[in-house]
Image (tube, rainbow, N blue to C red):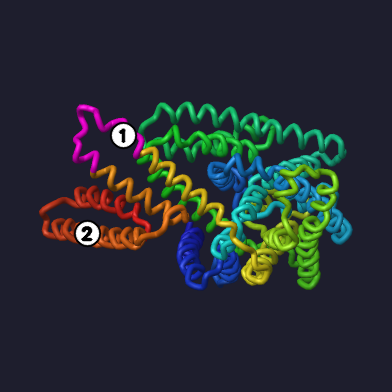
Amino acid sequence: MHEIEPLLLALMMAVAGLSVLARMVRVPYPILLVLGGLVLGFVPGMPAVELPPELVLVAFLPPLLYWSGFFSSPRDLRADARAISLLAVGLVLATTVAVAVLAHAMVEGMTWPAAFALGAIVSPTDPLAASAIGRRLGVPRRLLTLLEGESLVNDATALTAYRVAVAAAASGSFVLWQAGLRFVVMAAGGVVVGLLVGWLVAELRRRLDDPVVEIVVSVFTGYAAYLPAELLGVSGVLAAVTAGVYVGWRAPGLSSAATRLLGFSFWEVLVYLANAVLFILVGLQLRPILEDLGGTAVAVLVAQGAAVSAVVIAVRLGWGFSIPYLVRLIDRRPSQVMRRAGARERLMIGWSGMRGAVSLAAALALPLDFPMRNLILFLTFSVILATLVLQGLTLPALIRRLRLEDDDSEEREELKGRLAATYAALDRLDELAGADWTRDDTVERLRGMYEFRRRRLKARGGYLEDDGVEDRSQAYQRLLRELLGAQRDAIVRLRNQGKISNDVMHRIERELDLEDSRLEI
């Protein structure tokens, strides 16, 4: 018990401190968390971190996969299905094979199942750092969609291949056609389980009207899809992702405004903490791994880690500048010609293949008696460290050098959505103007507000000449924020004077905060 206390304290301080530092130096937090965990692992007196292998994947992955699927756009995934499939299936399998061949030839005594397990572990990408950098630097949305869509599906591809390799290592035999058939069955079965669970959860949530209970159900959904799928011998990863995509698509008709506000805030913190803990655990693993590999020279280990990392990076870059050209020779449909990416875009995608939480969780989940488990853990750590630090720290400079232009598609879609909502409100006002329960002065006041919003949005989109409407809007919002601040000060004073309770203050404060959150300034 006394060994756990300093570890928990160190984890909490590291997550908080390194997250703040990452924001200050404008570096994606996964990079600093890995490096911080590495330093933390060598602090004298720090206990070794030993996680039960069977709990690692189950504890961390289901909610992360579910939430990634929840925010994925089926329309965008379908539009770029070919490109995403090539990256998430073809590239993952190519990386798995390349790493397996290298490891089998380079490491004496490494069996083919163990080599393929290593290849499957280091093949999936983690989009956190790349997406954070890309959004900050204005990378076109389609490239971010490709990165996130690839990560969404390649986790399933890699972990399905990983399951096949682990099973082959346990049985002592590996037959290619059997492994391929099992791969297809596991993937298809995972999608079916995910759709079934997603439908059941959606029907359940449609009948609920309690924000806290609905959020609990949303957390449960990832596990409800993942665990039955694993028990049935199919892909739990694809089941969790599919359930997330299905529930996310139906979510606008399932949840109230209160549930969405509370749920998004809860999930944002939960996903951040889960990823932060996993990335720190990456760094903490190095010391016990090196201690267990004490019989191997450090120079040999470093050379092996560098070789595997180089292959992982080289295969991704080579894939991006070879396979798309072959596909173009076959598929010359106009719709696909219009979506072709240039060399600059492919280079950015190729250099964004950072590894992270999924690779670590898969490596830690290897059975304790798995052949060369500690060496596989070390090589996994090497790939994560090399890709996160080398590629993560150089990616911003590469993006600036490539001069990738933001296509403004997201801003235009947002403007289109806001205008549609405003026109819908004006149409509904016209329909309700003659109702017995409406008042003429209220209707006219609301119509004036929405007409002002319509003019401002059309001026922002260039459809009308800006006659100062944007400046007036900014001034109005600034004035409103000042008034909200004055109201907050007033209720805090009443609470401090004992004239209202703390609960009453927080209820009013929440209403003021919701008003404040609608302001654009």
Say whether residue 48 is visible.
no
Q: Do the residues labelled 1 and 2 touch (CB within 8 Å)?
A: no
Q: In which quarter of the view is residue 28 placed?
A: bottom right
Q: What x and y, as percent, mark residue 494?
A: 13, 57
- Provide the secondary structure element on which disc 1 rests: helix
Q: Which residue is drawn at 62% across and 36% down?
A: 239
Say whether residue 514 is visible.
yes
N-terminal label among 1 and 2: 1
Q: In which quarter of the view is residue 179 placed?
A: top right
Instruction: Name the amino acid type tagged 2.
Output: Leu
Q: Which of the labelled discs sits on residue 483, or is there none? A: 2
Q: What x and y, as percent, mark residue 209?
A: 36, 32
Q: What x and y, as percent, mark residue 152?
A: 63, 46
Q: Residue at x 44, y 56 (%)?
A: 460
Inter-mark Cα distance, 1 to 2: 31 Å
Residue situated in front as seen by the camera: 443 or 38:
443
Q: Is residue 248 left or right of residue 496?
A: right
Whether 430 is among the magenta residues is yes
Instruction: Name the amino acid type tagged 1.
Output: Asp
Vertical order, 482 against 170 (above or below): below
Whether 152 is among the magenta residues is no
Q: What stretch is highlighted in magenta?
A: 426-444
Please rate how many residues cluster around mark 2, counting C-alpha atoms within 10 Å: few if below 14, some from 14 to 19, many from 20: few
Please rate how many residues cluster around mark 1, counting C-alpha atoms within 10 Å: few if below 14, some from 14 to 19, many from 20: few
> To which residue does mark 1 refer?
430
- Provide the secondary structure element on which disc 2 rests: helix
